[in-house]
Image: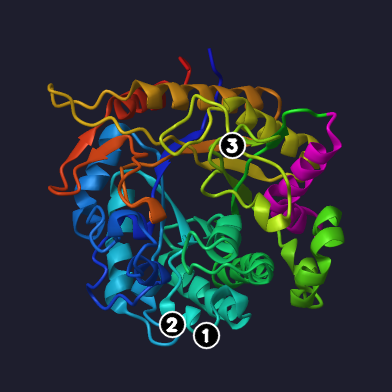
Amino acid sequence: MSTFPQGFIWGAATSSYQIEGAAHVDGRGVSIWDTFCATPGKVAKGDTGDVANDHYHRYPEDISIMKDLGLQGYRFSFAWPRMFPNGSGAAEERGFAFYDRLIDSLLEADIEPLATLYHWDLPQALQDKGGWENRDTIKHFADYSAAVVERFGDRVKKFTPINEPWVVAWLGNGIGIHAPGKTDRKAAWAVAHHTVVAHAASTQAMRSVRSDILTGPVLNQTRSVPDDINDAQQAHAADLIDAISNRFWMDAFMLGKYPQVVMDKFGDELTPWIKDGDLEAATVKNDFIGINYYFDNRVGPSLGGKPEWHSISGLFDLDIDETPRGPLTDMGWPLTPQGLEALLVRWHKEHGDNLPDLYITENGAAYDEGPSSDGAVHDQRRIDYLSTHLKAVSNAIAQGSPVKGYYQWSLMDNFEWALGYDKRFGIVHVDFDTQKRIVKDSGIWYRDQIKNNGRNI
């Protein structure tokens, strides 16, 4: 029997570009993902987020589903270009009004909103001026952050500035499989550092408007596990990948510095972007840290398979292989719930009482089960994934890790970035031709866990 504390928040998560659609409605500006999707060969099957789940128009139905599932929290993201079409300057009232309607409807359903300010859909107008490589974007982001809290901070009390800065830097600017599609290691280091500075600037800007809000980063984290812990090459690679993936942001926010192994190897590329006071500002107090976890990375010799589509080891001149061992999800990701437990325990051990509250802000699996002849969606594999990972969270809590909530990814099948609509993470099935929603067996299972606070996991 698992144990979750009283007051533990059971939620689900989405993001604006992945579900809203309405890309050319009510004055919304162009985002880097609109541009990326319009570039031939960048997204599977030429898919776009133009319609996605049409959540912009169908949010009342979606919130009704959330309420029926018993969700206590809902993590969503604001679309920056919907409210500031050019990223700065004139605001678009119709965009702000949409989020008024969404937030009010969530509160009427007794669902607590957790709002992300930036989930990768940068206004294209800012990208045209250098995007996150340009420090001016940090000021625009801070101004946008203040405007959001000024409008919604009376009702939304939890905010996260940037979702998964590692992805913003390395998948978007390092290996280019996400928007804006750059392949430039030096640019990625600039973006990585600027996300640290932007987090601090956004946090300070929001708190200057309201002192009663709670804020914190959302970091995608993974362990890098050597096949042979006694192999020096594997150990070094695992340490460096951990430093780039995890400690870069954790050390910046908790300690005001970057990992020494990063500075030793890449300091000449990173240091030019660091200005006096940047890392001191990075230690702005966080009320919580959100952790997005999906799988552990394998570090070892080649298994003769195809390299992971998102692998960045080659970018750092590491002669290692990250091809995972099965079984795998539809994303090609291994099942490693023990890694989630280990990460949560690790941060508690390393930072002790200085560690703020933790939330699992994303965790889930892509499996392709669709409606059966009985009209239901029987996705036992997803139930198994969620069960083992929630058990890992419970185990970590029992060891003292301060985890206060869990947001399953994702509420609905949606646009899965460069992979288009082929990969389905939702506990609610979506027919993208008809927009019909069906709660999957995993959604019914999750509803039951919420009812009993996870006692039967």
Q: Which residues are magenta?
A: 230-257
Residue 242 shown in magenta: yes
Q: Between 353 and 336, which is closer to the camera in this rendering?
A: 336
Left or right of residue 6, residue 437 in this image: left
* The quarter of the displayed image where residue 373 is located: top left
For mark 1, give the secondary structure.
loop
Please tell me how crowded label 1 is: few (under 14), some (14-19), or many (20+) other residues with Cα within 10 Å. few
Mark nearest the camera among 3 and 1 is: 3
Q: Distance of mark 2 from mark 1, alpha carbons?
A: 7 Å
For mark 2, give the secondary structure.
helix
* The quarter of the displayed image where residue 200 is located: bottom right
Q: Residue furthest bottom?
A: 89
- Above/below status of 354 relative to 181: above
Amino acid residing under circle 1: Lys
Q: Are marks 3 and 1 in contact (CB under 8 Å)?
A: no
Residue 43 shown in magenta: no
Amino acid residing under circle 2: Ala
Q: Is residue 427 visible?
A: yes
Q: Check disc 3 and report the residue beneath it.
A: 323
Please name the residue shown 56% across and 79% down the image.
Answer: 137
Q: Position of residue 445 (x, y in %)?
A: 34, 23
Q: Check disc 1 and report the residue beneath it.
A: 129
Q: Distance of mark 3 from mark 2, alpha carbons?
A: 38 Å
**Majority secondary structure in the magenta region:** helix
The disc placed on residue 125 is 2
Please name the residue shown 21% across and 51% down the image.
Answer: 60
Q: Are marks 2 and 1 in contact (CB under 8 Å)?
A: yes
Please name the residue shown 41% across and 65% down the image.
Answer: 152
Amino acid residing under circle 3: Thr
Left or right of residue 324, residue 344 in this image: right
For mark 3, give the secondary structure.
loop
- Above/below status of 65 relative to 445: below
